[in-house]
Amino acid sequence: MDAAVVISLASLGLAALTFVATQFGSRRTATASYVEQLEARVEFLEARLEKTEVENERLHDENFRLLRQVSKLAAAANGV
Amino acid sequence: MFERLKGLIKRVDERWRGAQLSKVALGKYIVLFASVLHIGWAALLMGRAETVGSTPIAVLSEVFGGRWRSAVVLLIVAGLALVFPFLKRGASNATLALLLLPQQVALFMSAGAGLWAAMKEQYADGVTRGWAFILSDQLPVILLSIMYTVVVIEAAFEPPTKVVVTDREAAEDIMRGGQA
């Protein structure tokens, strides 16, 4: 057989082996990658939740303070 | 003696795995190098007929049927491979194989031709030299084909993981029906 054909067939064989290897890779890493992404997402969402809770509390206090102020102003306006 | 050698290999392996020259992965540069090499060969093939005689290209020319077809094949494999680094995350391993393996075959063919020439002690154009001379001459392409295989395997087994860090990215992911 011609050398070029032999070399080409061998190259295709090696590429086929690499292809098989990459397919095994997809199975193993898809899960690992998925879990890693989920962990990162959970961490991020937890940090954001904490920040939101703090902000929520601050807004609640601010709201309460303003309501009291409005109530005082209304009472003053009505001459109570 | 054997245990010490095993220990040494393990230490070298750990060092190598831990070695990081920069934050940027090297794989894309190997793909880029192979692609630029193939585009260069294609340009030379189209420009000068004598290029067909060079050992790494002669085998391609013989299999693909002449210099023009080989040039087109080289441009296609280089183009396909160059697409891969620009793909967003989530590209499957089948896509990886589809884009990178054609170039790998072309590299293996050139590497195989180099090894064959060294064994025969004769370049593809008929010039005879000692095996060591030819092997040292062809070694870069042979090594590139090996490095390229490592890149393909590494890309399949250790893909970069995307970590969501900004509100916008998280919102975009949720809008797309992300995994969280």
Image: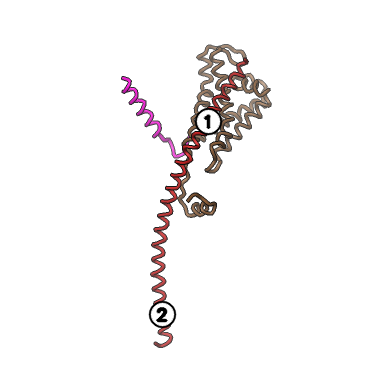
Q: What whole-number distance in Å separates the C-alpha atoms at marks 2 and 1?
A: 75 Å
Mark toward the viewer: 2 or 1: 1
Give the answer, above or below, for where A49 lies relative to A69. above
Q: Quadrant of residue A58?
A: bottom left
Whether residues under marks 2 and 1 lie with C-beta atoms below 8 angstroms apart, the answer is no
Question: Tag 1's secondary structure?
Answer: helix
Residue placed most toward the observer, B30 or A49: A49
- The colour mode here is by chain
Q: Which amino acid, mark 2?
A: Ser
Q: Which amino acid, mark 1?
A: Val
x then y, percent, for residue B25: 47, 37
Judging by the rendered image, the residue that carries numbered circle 1 is A20
Give the answer, above or below, for where B179 lies relative to B113. below
Verify whether residue A62 appears in magenta. Answer: no
Residue at 61 percent across and 22 percent down: it is B57
Q: Colour of chain A?
A: red
Q: Magenta part of the protein: which range?
A: B1-26
x then y, percent, for residue B148: 52, 29
Label 2 crowding class (10 Å Cα cut-off): few <14, some 14-19, many 20+?
Answer: few
Residue placed most toward the observer, B93 or B7: B93
Verify whether residue B7 appears in magenta. Answer: yes
Quarter of the picture containing the N terminus of chain B is top left
